[in-house]
């Protein structure tokens, strides 16, 4: 956790500096009779050092000057005067002032260097993130666009030579590419909505059975090779939640599973309700996730090391964002003997009166 004074006015920092030095001097005054005035010097010097770690240079220099003045006036014999009788005390006072100033300046300079290093690191991370996003988008958007352009060009220029089957196939390619393009743009828009912080769930009565079957049908239209099985109690109640968000959550999880699991993988979708909580489990018997990367998979633009080309790394981050926007949670774990399990839990009102859905 980093402490920053960037939002504190300089005038307030002067007050803080003055107050803390006076407080340290008061503590020193209480113990000076048995600890000695030299120990008080160490207390004041440590105080200035601590202030230099948090405040701007000018308030810290004030603290250094003020602490030296207070030490001289209240603690160095004779007390309550600025006179210094012995040469040793005069040298000590001079060295104290110099050390306090040098310590304040050096600490401030170190902070500045650390700040520059952090800004440079953040800039490098931003550039890296931008390049990752650009590379992903260039592939994910260019591929469907190229398909659409190629298919439409063929339809326009070779229409007379095409059989009805050829036309139907080309139109199907355009439809699939358009859907993929719409999906990627939708993910970007959804992430933008989440990051804006103004997203609000639009809760309404939702039939979980109907929603899950509709989403699975949409995923299966992508000509997937995996087998998706659905296990939902037909008597599961209606849940009052944002149907659009839940649809995106389930779709992104299933789409992610079909993209990154072997062709013969079995994917299970399980939904149940208990104590006004909807629990949806999506698990597969694929290869699972590397244990050291599980904590990162919900991060924006994150892609597993060695993952195949393609994908913007937004799907799982949207899942997490939408689940949390509805007050729920999502967690990922590997299962035995192999595979992965996503568990989504969303608190919501329930009702067994099915006619509420149409109200």
Image (tube, rainbow, N blue to C red):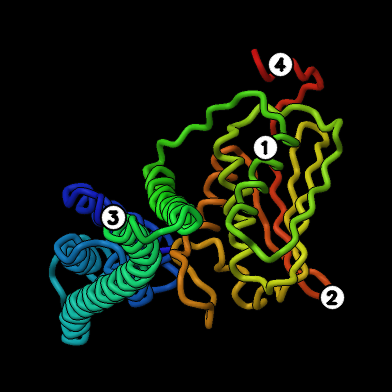
For residue 61, what is the image quadrant? bottom left
Provide the residue designation for mark 1.
211
Q: Which of marks 3 and 4 is in front?
A: 3
CA gap, disc 1 and disc 2: 30 Å
| Residue at x-position 71% and y-position 26% | 349
| Residue at x-position 25% and y-position 50% | 7
Q: Which of marks 1 and 3 is in front?
A: 3
Query: Looking at the image, is mark 1 or mark 3 earlier in the sequence?
Result: 3
Q: Which of marks 2 and 3 is in front?
A: 3
Query: Looking at the image, is mark 4 or mark 1 earlier in the sequence?
Result: 1
For residue 45, what is the image quadrant? bottom left
- Mark 3 lies on a secondary structure that is helix
CA gap, disc 2 and disc 4: 42 Å
**Could one spot residue 198 in this view of the protein?**
yes
Q: Taking 184 as reference, is 353 left or right?
A: right
| Badge 3: residue crowd in 10 Å (few <14, some 14–19, many ≥20) | few
Provide the residue designation for mark 3.
156
Query: Looking at the image, is mark 2 or mark 3 earlier in the sequence?
Result: 3
Provide the residue designation for mark 4.
356
State if disc 4 and disc 3 touch (CB < 8 Å). no
| Residue at x-position 40% and y-position 36% | 198
Provide the residue designation for mark 2.
337
- Mark 2 lies on a secondary structure that is loop
Viewer-proximal residue, 313 or 116?
Answer: 313
| Badge 2: residue crowd in 10 Å (few <14, some 14–19, many ≥20) | few
| Residue at x-position 31% and y-position 60% | 158
């Amino acid at each position: 956790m980093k402490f920053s004074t960037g939002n504190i006015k300089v005038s307030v920092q002067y007050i803080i500096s003055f107050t803390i030095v006076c407080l340290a001097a008061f503590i020193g005054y209480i113990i000076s009779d048995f600890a000695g005035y030299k120990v008080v010097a160490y207390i004041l010097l440590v105080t200035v050092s601590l202030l230099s770690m948090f405040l701007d240079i000018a308030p810290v220099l004030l603290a250094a000057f003020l602490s030296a003045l207070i030490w001289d006036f209240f603690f160095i014999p004779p007390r309550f005067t600025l006179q210094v009788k012995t040469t040793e005390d005069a040298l000590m006072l001079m060295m104290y002032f110099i050390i306090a100033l040098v310590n304040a300046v050096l600490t401030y300079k170190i902070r500045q260097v650390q700040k520059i290093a952090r800004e440079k690191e953040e800039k490098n991370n931003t550039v890296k993130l931008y390049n990752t996003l650009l590379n992903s988008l260039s592939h994910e958007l260019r591929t469907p666009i190229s398909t659409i352009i190629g298919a439409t060009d063929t339809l326009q220029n070779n229409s007379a030579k095409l059989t009805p089957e050829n036309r139907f196939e080309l139109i199907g390619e355009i439809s699939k590419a358009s859907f993929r393009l719409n999906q990627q743009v939708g993910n970007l828009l959804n992430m933008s909505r989440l990051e804006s912080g103004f997203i609000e769930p639009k809760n309404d009565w939702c039939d979980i059975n109907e929603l899950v079957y509709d989403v699975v049908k949409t995923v299966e239209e992508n000509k997937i090779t995996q087998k998706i099985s659905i296990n939902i109690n037909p008597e599961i109640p209606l849940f009052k939640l944002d149907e659009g968000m839940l649809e995106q959550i389930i779709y992104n999880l299933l789409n992610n599973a079909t993209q990154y699991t072997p062709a013969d993988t079995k994917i299970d979708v399980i939904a149940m309700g208990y104590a006004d909580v909807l629990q949806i489990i999506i698990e597969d018997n694929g290869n699972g996730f590397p244990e050291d990367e599980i904590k990162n998979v919900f991060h924006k633009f994150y892609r597993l090391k060695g993952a195949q080309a393609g994908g913007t790394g937004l799907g799982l981050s949207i899942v997490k964002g939408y689940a949390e926007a509805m007050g729920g949670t999502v967690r990922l774990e590997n299962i035995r003997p192999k595979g992965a399990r996503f568990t989504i839990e969303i608190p919501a009102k329930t009702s067994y009166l099915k006619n509420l859905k149409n109200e």
